[in-house]
């Protein structure tokens, strides 16, 4: 059962109809009075639902004629410069850039637009302190004990319940707690892949996925993904004709960096194809609970047709983007013997997890505080994305294209010809701003004109978008590529 506020559910219903093309640009929504009657809600709730849609940039209020669907067609479409699958060759240049980027995101003096973590101000720091202190007061022995794999049972049960709410039937013993999603990804790749195996990834994708795949000695096949609907399974089908692919790693819900949301029909096609080709899947679901309209997004693996003895469908998640990045609480979900293999691997890697953060997360989840926190995050991200898109439109050179994610807080930006993401990254650091250059999100070429920006850092942003825009215009004018 959903735990969202009533107005959010009403807004989510209309948002879906608009995004699925059932309501057209310019079409009028029911009047507030009609909405109250139809949904049996108060005027306040009806108004809150329409304000939410307004905040999401989907409708606009018009004097005396109520709310209308906004003209979405005007948005510039962002397309991948890649067309076909390719075997990627890592370069030394990219490694150096990755080191420079990590140094920049760790520098507290820089405006953190390159970070993949929301602003500190959005995390419930006081509540985290209160819960941690209380736990340590009542159970000081937490510091004297390990949390051996698969990890705290109460937390695993709560995670399984949340995933069941989203359509993934999970048992408590199918959840293994890890040190963040990064460890979960790495363990998942290690149980599935042997050195020299081919692993398919989206392009662009989160650089941690590229590093983890390379870490197990995999050959990495990059498949062009789509900033609106995620990766098309036809690309994997094509890649399977040339390579014997062992596994694919996907971020189908508000992927990093491009932010697309794969429609359920496409997820269904993925499940059929994976079964047909005998390819395992690792779904990175880090942003799956962060739909701006509060909708419950079904994970791709919930459509899986995994049978016993077949390559598995694994799901990876964490609480790093929503509650406590510093707690390093993540998880990987697997069935039957795969759950057992993962547990053993975790045991041989780090023996156990830290007890306190697991119990802090369990306390938040069981008290309902986490649900409130998610609502706050979603609303701040919807605002941040809308504001940042507006600022980019105002300050960046014409011809700039920006993703329009319906969840999460990352914006993927394509600069016009003449600009270069890596040069902009260096010029921005000199002005006290960190950004993430697009070249980091692939092992190959093609994304030199892209950058990723953090719309969850609204508080720290100040005039930095105007500064970045000025730098990009200067690049464009001097034809610096
Ligand atoms: C798609 C994706 N997966 C995994 C991670 C790593 O998450 P964690 O901090 O929980 O290890 C990130 C962090 O940016 C991410 O964006």
Image: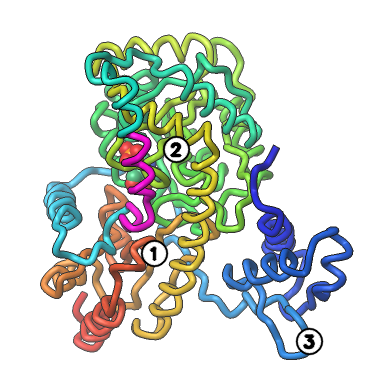
Quadrant containing ligand 1:
top left
Q: Is residue 209 visible?
A: no
What residue appears at the point 40 percent right and 44 percent down from the top-left corner?
A: 323
In magenta stretch: residue 139 = no
**Based on the displayed image, in which of its 4 quarters is residue 328 positioned?**
top left
Left/right of residue 432 with respect to residue 197 in the rendered view: left
- Circle 3 packing at 10 Å, graded few (<14), some (14-19), many (20+), is few
Q: Main secondary structure of the magenta part?
A: helix
Assign a secondary structure to mark 1.
loop
The C terminus, quarter of image: bottom left
Location of mark 3 (residue):
65
**Based on the displayed image, in which of its 4 quarters is residue 433 positioned?**
bottom left
Using the image, determine if residue 2 lies above or below residue 422.
Answer: above
Q: CA distance from mark 2 to mark 3?
A: 43 Å
In this rendered view, identify the residue nearer to me: 164 or 215. 164
* Image location (x, y in percent) of residue 279: 50, 26
Quick one: label 1 or label 3, which is nearer the N terminus? Answer: 3
- Circle 2 packing at 10 Å, graded few (<14), some (14-19), many (20+), is many
Extent of the magenta region: 117-132
What residue appears at the point 30 percent right and 36 percent down from the top-left corner?
A: 327
Q: CA distance from mark 2 to mark 1?
A: 20 Å
Location of mark 2 (residue):
284
Assign a secondary structure to mark 2.
strand
What residue appears at the point 73 percent right and 78 percent down from the top-left corner?
A: 67
Quick one: label 2 or label 3, which is nearer the N terminus? Answer: 3
Quick one: label 2 or label 1, which is nearer the N terminus? Answer: 2
* Image location (x, y in percent) of residue 229: 57, 54
Location of mark 1 (residue):
455
């Amino acid at each position: 059962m959903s735990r969202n506020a009533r107005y959010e559910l009403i807004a989510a219903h209309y948002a879906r109809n608009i995004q699925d093309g059932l309501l057209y640009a310019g079409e009028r929504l029911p009047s507030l009075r009609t909405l109250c009657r139809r949904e049996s809600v108060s005027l306040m709730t009806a108004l809150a639902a329409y304000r939410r849609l307004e905040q999401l940039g989907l409708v606009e209020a018009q004097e005396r004629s109520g709310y209308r669907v906004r003209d979405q067609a005007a948005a510039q479409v962002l397309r991948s410069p890649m067309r076909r699958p390719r075997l990627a060759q890592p370069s030394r240049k990219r490694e150096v850039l990755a080191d420079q980027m990590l140094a920049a995101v760790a520098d507290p003096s820089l405006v953190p637009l390159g970070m993949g973590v929301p602003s500190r101000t959005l995390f419930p720091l006081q509540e985290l302190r209160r819960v941690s202190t209380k736990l340590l007061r009542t159970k000081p022995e937490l510091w004297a004990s390990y949390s051996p794999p698969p990890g705290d049972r109460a937390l695993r049960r709560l995670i399984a319940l949340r995933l069941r709410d989203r359509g993934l039937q999970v048992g408590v013993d199918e959840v293994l707690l890890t040190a963040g999603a990064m460890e979960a990804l790495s363990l998942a790749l290690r149980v599935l892949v042997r050195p020299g195996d081919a692993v398919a990834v989206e392009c662009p994708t989160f650089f941690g996925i590229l590093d983890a795949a390379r870490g197990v000695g995999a050959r990495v096949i990059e498949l062009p993904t789509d900033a609106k609907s995620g990766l098309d399974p036809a690309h994997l089908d094509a890649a399977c004709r040339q390579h014997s692919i062992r596994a694919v790693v996907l971020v189908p819900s508000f992927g990093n960096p491009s932010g697309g949301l794969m429609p359920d029909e496409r997820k269904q096609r993925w499940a059929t194809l994976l079964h047909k080709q005998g390819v395992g899947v690792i779904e990175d679901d880090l942003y799956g609970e962060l739909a701006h309209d509060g909708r419950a997004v079904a994970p791709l693996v919930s459509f899986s047709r995994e049978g016993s003895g077949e390559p598995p469908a694994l799901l990876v998640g964490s609480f790093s983007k929503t509650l406590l990045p510093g707690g390093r609480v993540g998880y990987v979900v697997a069935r039957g013997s795969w759950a057992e293999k993962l547990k053993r691997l975790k045991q041989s890697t780090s023996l156990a997890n830290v007890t306190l953060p697991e119990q802090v997360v369990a306390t938040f989840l069981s008290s309902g505080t986490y649900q409130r926190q998610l609502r706050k995050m979603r609303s701040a991200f919807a605002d941040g994305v809308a504001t940042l898109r507006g600022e980019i439109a105002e300050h960046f050179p014409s011809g700039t294209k920006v993703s329009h994610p319906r969840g999460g807080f990352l914006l993927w930006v394509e600069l016009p010809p003449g600009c270069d993401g890596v040069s902009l990254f260096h010029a921005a650091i000199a002005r006290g701003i960190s950004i993430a250059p697009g070249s980091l999100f692939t092992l190959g070429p093609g994304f030199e004109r892209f950058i990723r920006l953090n719309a969850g850092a609204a508080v720290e942003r100040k005039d930095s978008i105007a500064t970045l825009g000025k730098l990009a215009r200067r690049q464009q004018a001097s034809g610096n590529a």
